[in-house]
Amino acid sequence: MRSLEALTSYLEQVLGHAPDLSPISKDRLAALPLYLRSRYDFLDARLDQGKIVFALVSESDAADSPSVHAGNLEVLERVLNKPVALVLPGIPSYQRNRLVHQRVPFVVPGSQLFLPMLMMDLRESFQRAPRSSGDTLSASTQALLIFYLLGNPVRDVTLNELADRLGYSAMTLSNASRQLEEFELAKSERQGRSVSVVFPRSRRRTWQKALKLMSSPVKRVVRANWQSSSNPGQKAGTSALAEMTMLDASSYAIWAVPAAEWRADSREIPESDRGNIWLELWKYNPRRLSDGELVDPLSLYLSLRGTGDERIHIALEQILEEFQW
């Protein structure tokens, strides 16, 4: 179980005795939404100040925004009928400060304990968290990977041809192929002077292995006025999700466009004003992965998986269940 030993040791130091920790029952675990059940490990805890549930967070999920954490805790507390606190790995002090500011209960073993519902706030001397680097795929690597996951042929296609298809230079795709090799997701195969990329696993297994390395394609979101009769891009966000599932459509349209092609002009307006659309500026070109009106479903999943809205997570699970691997 994630961080159990570190949590136990830290609570013993704080409380002056060994904490009373136990896994929550299977019945209570089964009552949780799937996206939360798979996201955390759970422990019932009896502390001197009261009872609480600890939700242990993986390193890949620790950097989520405080609003995402708060939304997840709200659902957990409602279902489990107990106060819930996150147990996080080492994170920078500014992230801890943001959690405290938004009153999100958490424990970082060895660094800080903030449980406002139990009137506990303990801060110790912080050790600087090591800066993570190279733990996510680049935008071009992710685009190449999703191109494969969507069922497009790659094995007998040269990197030069893939570069042309995805709108990158041959050098960029060569670097993307190299990164896939570094993470053991694919390997390069040379035939004469040509090089192609080979994925040894099925698309479903590749997705599962790569998921923790992938990030949202959205670089920035802007509000804009769009007067043209043509669409600015492809439907994205909850606008696209509503068309793929039974989710209610949002009251405003959301469109994805390549960040590299966006030029902030009179169409972009301040958030305080009213615009008629929202534009997601993507790190890679969404049109290269989908030639329809909607963005591709896997990129859509990655763009929305960090939300704290349970309805959106249910709809995203539906997308993956129906996806033709």
Image (spheres, grey):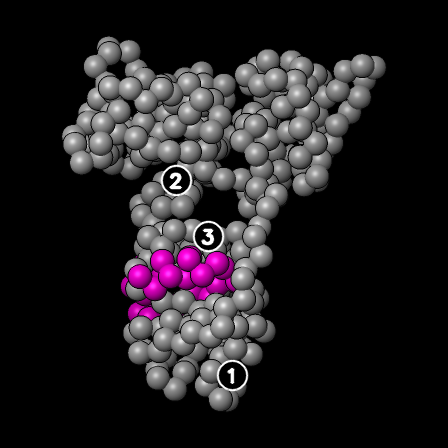
The 10 Å Cα crowd at callout 2, few under 14, some 14 to 19, many 20 or more, is many
The 10 Å Cα crowd at callout 1, few under 14, some 14 to 19, many 20 or more, is few
Numbered tag placed on residue 63 in the rendering = 3
The CA span between labels 2 and 1 is 39 Å
Amino acid found under the numbered disc labelled 2: Leu
The 10 Å Cα crowd at callout 3, few under 14, some 14 to 19, many 20 or more, is some
Q: Is residue 98 found inside the magenta-colored segment of the image?
A: yes
The quarter of the image holding the C terminus is: top right
- Above or below residue 226? Residue 203 is below
- Residue at figure coordinates x 49%, y 59% from the top left: 91
Q: Which residue is mark 1?
A: 13
- Above or below residue 155? Residue 14 is below
Image label count:
3
Measured from the top left, where is residue 324 in percent x and y?
A: 52, 30
**Of 112 and 148, which appears nearest the observer?**
112
Q: Earlier in the sequence, mark 3 or mark 2?
A: 3
In the picture, measured across the screen, residue 226 lies left or right of residue 33, that is left
Magenta span of residues: 74-101
Report the residue that reaches farthest toward the right: 192
State which quadrant residue 97 falls in.
bottom left
